Image: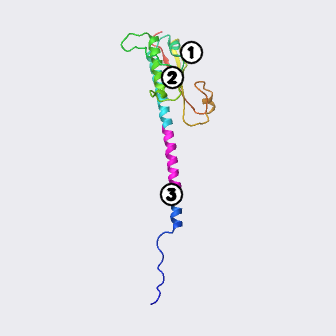
Amino acid sequence: MYNLPPKSVRGFTLIEVLIAFIILSFGLLGAVALQAKAKQASFDAMQRAAAIALGNDIIQRMRANDDAGLTARYNGDFSSDDKLNTQLRCYSNVCTAAEIAALDKQQWIRAIQARENTGALDDATVCINNQADAARGSNAFNLEVIISWQGRQEYTATGDRSAIKCGANNKKRRVVVLTSFMYLRAS
């Protein structure tokens, strides 16, 4: 008998399999990290959308309760740490403009209390600053609603955002500023 030449070896060596496994592992780790960043961005977007919805609600309620006492009733600050007054009722009773404004503030406090699972913003503060615009007439007002809350990640705010005085000014603070204009229906 004579010896046949060895057939070419087919298949993978252990080294090739290990290299392929390492490359696959790095790819999977990158995909997991990307998924985590996407989830954080989605959460931040949800909080920003909730803050904008709350700010628009505040402005619309002020427009519905507009008379000469607008600035006295609505101007000021409140936070998610404020206590709720559950005794306020204006659903079946006839209420004054001041009672409606007090109920509005209580509903907004409830909307920002994320720790009590009734809201969407963590450690939120709302600052309302309405000012008369005398240049446009005695019934003209500039409305400003600032909503700040604590995000999950730190970031460095720009000069405009860091100058805003509403809520705790730290590296996790997020801020939304809504401005509008209105004329009072009655004076």
* Residue 29 on the magenta span: yes
* Residue 66 on the magenta span: no
In the image, is residue 21 above or below residue 149?
Answer: below
Q: Which residue is painted at 51% across and 60% down in the image?
A: 21
Distance between the alpha carbons at the discs numbered 3 and 2: 53 Å
Q: Earlier in the sequence, mark 3 or mark 2?
A: 3
Q: Which residue is mark 2?
A: 180
Q: Label 2: state its secondary structure.
A: strand
Q: The magenta stretch spans which residues?
A: 24-42
Q: Label 1: state its secondary structure.
A: helix
Q: Which residue is mark 1?
A: 135
Q: Label 3: state its secondary structure.
A: helix
Q: Main secondary structure of the magenta part?
A: helix
Percent from the top left, x then y, of residue 144? 54, 22
Percent from the top left, x then y, of residue 33? 52, 47
The amino acid sitting under disc 2 is: Ser
